[in-house]
Image: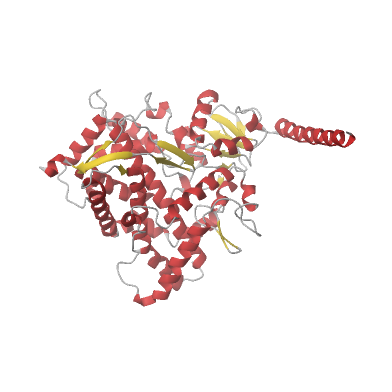
Amino acid sequence: MSLLSSFLQSLGCLLLVISAQFLWTYIRSPIRNIPGPFFAKFTHLWRFFDVYAGRPELTQQILHEKYGYAVRLGPNVVSISDPKLLRTMYNTRGDFLKSKFYTVNDTKVGSQIIHNVFSTLSNEWHSAALRPIQKFYKMSSLLAQEPLINHTIEAFCKRLDEEFVNTGKTCKMDEWMLFFAWDVIGQLTFRRPMGFMDEGRDHSGLLSTADKALDYFAAIGQIPELDHWLAKNPIRPIGPPSFDSAAIFCAQQIAERQQAGEKSSGQPDMLDGFLEIKRATPEVMDDNAIVGALLVNILAGADTTAILLRAIVYYTLKNPRVYKKLQEELGNANLSQPVTYAAASALPYLDAVVRESARVHPGVGLLLERIVPASGLTLSDGTIVPPGTIVGMNGWVIHQDKQIFGQDAASFNPDRWLRDVASGETEEEFQPRLAMMKAADLTFGAGNRICLGKNISILETYKVIATLFLNYDMSFVDPQMKWKVQNSWFVRQSGIDINIRKRRSLRD
């Protein structure tokens, strides 16, 4: 009995010490007056479990509606929803550095930690790594690769015809959009598709591994110190697959290409370009740097695009008026096939549908975390957020701002991106409104760390969406169906089951 009593006393003392430490942390906190969930003021476990539950973007929307522009999500973490501060926190100078959240995205091959342009916290490292490769991501360079995307789109349509149009089977469009996006990245990066469309499944396990790695990244990133004890444990990695397997895949592609040497033939791809930089200036780019660059391509370039493509199909089919108007514009545009990016991007309603889909369902659903610099951050109400505080904005919150996007900001309405001629809106009135919406767009991030693959996503999105809605009639198997959503940094969708057939005009 005395042993039990001693144990309970010890346990009570331990809990008292922990409680006292939490209380002391709260009392001393310079952000204690910023409102938020009670437990978030004391521990990061609150946001860990919120992210682990899978829909933190909805939680943050509710919290900002309740508390206003600033919400405390952790002992030293503040979510900001004031669009006026967007260009302050995400400026081109980069004086608001990334937080340690992003380091979970580093990969470990053997004992080597490999950074990439997404995960690094250093602006200097980021600039040095980006400098030799950024030319490959400019729209002008990508347009030279447009024939590769054309080939993939043609293969996509062929597979849709074989699997679904000719058979009448249900198309799981959420899966096929992902297959397509990964195969495009394969073409641009390795001069060959990844094989997902040919197989019609995740034949390599790479897609499943990427999903599990993102699940890990999103949750563990809320307490990034855990990563060193789990995935990057020097003795034995613990937990679900991280991005390491993808890094190994990229390393294998490099080795194969280098072994092929001059025997490699065909239109040069990104890997050719990276290897050429290594040969010409090995001090600028080594194999690890190439692995980092390839990782950004295959892990970020495919999933984010697939998310946008799914959103466009889903919201368009859910809104018959939008669907009809889009098909009419495409049908009257006298488009040649394969549809060129120049022609597709010039269509105003298609552009509005793409922008609105990205606004309503941005690909990233967590805070874009930054650290307040020595100058501090002054909020609109005069509150000063001190240096060292982690702050961030979430596109799912910013994109719902009614002062920016209108009182119907919660609804899907592509017309908001067009001049409201019926109500008498003049061009002089429309342009500032349009500019204000574009300035608040966090679809691809903002500032000096804006998404490197932005132009890849834009290029293939306009081309494939124009092709799909020009050539096919699509409808939900169940018109009342609602998709399933999982927020693990990327806000992935599933359950988009559709019927697909050739458009009537093409069949007649």
Report whether residue 99 is seen. no
Q: Is residue 333 left or right of residue 455?
A: left
Say above or below: 10 vs 264: above
In front: 355, or 93? 355
Q: Is residue 245 left or right of residue 308?
A: right
Say above or below: 335 vs 115: above
Residue 416 locus on image (x, y percent): 31, 30
Outermost residue on the bottom side: it is 262
The quarter of the rendered structure image containing the N terminus is top right
Q: How many marks?
A: 0
The quarter of the rendered structure image containing the C terminus is top left
In front: 190, or 64? 190
Q: Is residue 101 left or right of residue 30?
A: left
Task: Kindly identify the residue that appears in the image at 41 percent across and 71 percent down.
Answer: 257
Residue 204 locus on image (x, y percent): 42, 58
Task: Kindly identify the residue that appears in the image at 63 percent across and 40 percent down.
Answer: 387
Residue 299 locus on image (x, y percent): 45, 53
Residue 40 locus on image (x, y percent): 63, 32
Quadrant location of residue 389?
top right
Report whether residue 75 is seen. yes
Q: Is residue 485 left or right of residue 105?
A: left
Outermost residue on the right side: it is 2
Outermost residue on the left side: it is 508
